[in-house]
Amino acid sequence: MPSAKPRRILVTYSKYSTFVTTTLEYLLALKNFTDYQVDYVHVTHNAWMDFNINDYDVVFQNYCARLCFDGYVSPHYQNALARFRGLKILAVQDDYDHTAILWRAIRRLGFHVLLTCIPRDNWPLVYPESELPGVTLIQGITGYMPERLLNSGRSIPPLADRKIWVAYRGRDIGAKYGRLGFEKYEIGRRMQEICTARGIPCDIAMDDKSRIYGDAWFDFLASSRTMLGAESGSNAFDFDSKLEEQIKSFTKTNGRPPTYHEFKHVLDPLEAPFDVGQISPRVFESAAMGTPMILFRGKYSDAIEPDVHYIPLEKDFSNADAVLARLDDLEYLQGFADRAYDRLVKSGDYGHRSLARMIKATIEEEYPKRGASNWLRLPSVIPRQSPLKRVFRNRFVARHLGYAEQPTELPLPSNAPSAVGSTRRYPMMRRAWRLLPEPFRHRVMLALPPVIAQISRRYH
């Protein structure tokens, strides 16, 4: 039963996203920087909740457990969450994907607080009060300064020793993400052409094979005199999934997905009302590694300013030669690196500690408001199960088939087995079950519980 003050926080997530360092650090923010008791549970891919969710005071659902995709978040978890009596907080990124489906999920599950990266002046368009009555909106950003870099002991080479003058990694993500998505590819494509033509030492690539991960990414940053970049996010809000349907239709007809320019006539009206360009984790990483940034001029969540924290590049590349002409002026470049470091790193305003502080302040403010005045005295909304029902429903169906989950102290890696159950028990049954097609297994999992519950009631 929840306590009079919020103490126990359950963070729900998808373990298949924890390989992304920025997601894992976001998940750990409340654990590392608050005094709450924080547990974690994986809730996607038909995960079965083998515990009482009402033992917690607050559920904080991470953005990687995406409700905008039907069937991705476990139905069993959603049923438990709908009956949860504490404070419900949802963090969202990629708000432009299936936005109307997200609205319906927020209403159906009864979330009280929505943490979004969308700038405040766009809230009436993206999250109108008519769709989310009574929901409190708070603003975050798509990524935060990774504190681990400050304590890693990693050396930062002086700019004079960096042999790559212009660096970048991007990719062509097609038409779906509109102008902002196109710009993340175009800045690399055009600057690669310009640098090559002028003999500027560069390492720019936009193919998947050239992508860099983990510590190698920070080595790449530390070897680069400047890093290119563009705003993150998308202005192409696909509220009713019609954009996705049009892209699928084009792909089926032409045997390939459309390019941005081929869909520009469709995208322009969708994007016109919005301006949600956001700062990305790459900006913080560059600042931490002392790498000056050459960025398309933009808002960047109002965290940085052109000609102060980054060297602005016009989107028509009209000033590209002027920008490249200053790359041998090390004092000029160092000024941008120092000011970006002071703003994004040294200030402490953009680290995961600040994220945890904001979430904690929201919990302390919102927790007393939510629920009936006597809800703390209510019994658990999950009825006590008969032994037979528990054996059949939880142990047989969930544990032996590998879906049961219990809270853990830390997020699980993607290759971790279910938190409950042993692969050594009933190995032949498990092996036979895994041979069945996954869609069929999911249908069976959804169909079995009502049948088993009906049988168990006869013996209760």
Image: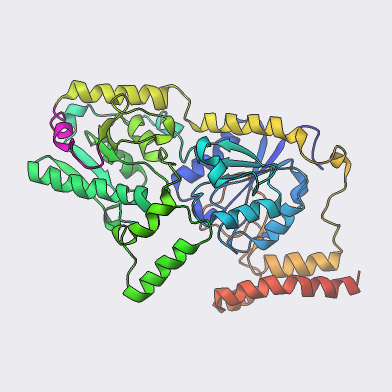
Residue 201 in view:
yes
Secondary structure character of the magenta stretch overall: loop
Where residue 95 appears, as percent x and y from the top left, is: 51, 49
Q: Is residue 51 left or right of residue 93?
A: right
Instruction: Please give the name of the residue rendered at 22% of the width and 42% of the height, measured from the top-left corner.
Output: 316
Which of these two is toward me, 3 or 337?
337
Which of these two is toward me, 229 or 286?
229
Which image quarter is the N terminus in?
Answer: top right
Which image quarter is the C terminus in?
Answer: bottom right
Question: Quarter-wise, where is residue 59 in the image?
Answer: top right
Where residue 285 appears, as percent x and y from the top left, is: 36, 35
Which of these two is toward me, 403 or 43?
43
Q: Within the magenta stretch, is there residue 218?
A: no
Instruction: Please give the name of the residue rendered at 26% of the width and 40% of the height, measured from the top-left corner.
Output: 228
Question: Quarter-wise, where is residue 8 in the image?
Answer: top right
* In the rendered image, the vertical position of residue 23 relative to residue 340, given as above or below: below
Q: Is residue 414 left or right of residue 314?
A: right
Which of these two is toward me, 114 or 265?
265
Instruction: Please give the name of the residue rendered at 15% of the width and 28% of the height, measured from the top-left corner.
Output: 326
The number of discs equals 0
Q: Which residues are magenta?
A: 314-328
Where residue 127 appears, as percent x and y from the top left, is: 58, 45
* In the rendered image, the vertical position of residue 288 relative to residue 452, given as above or below: above
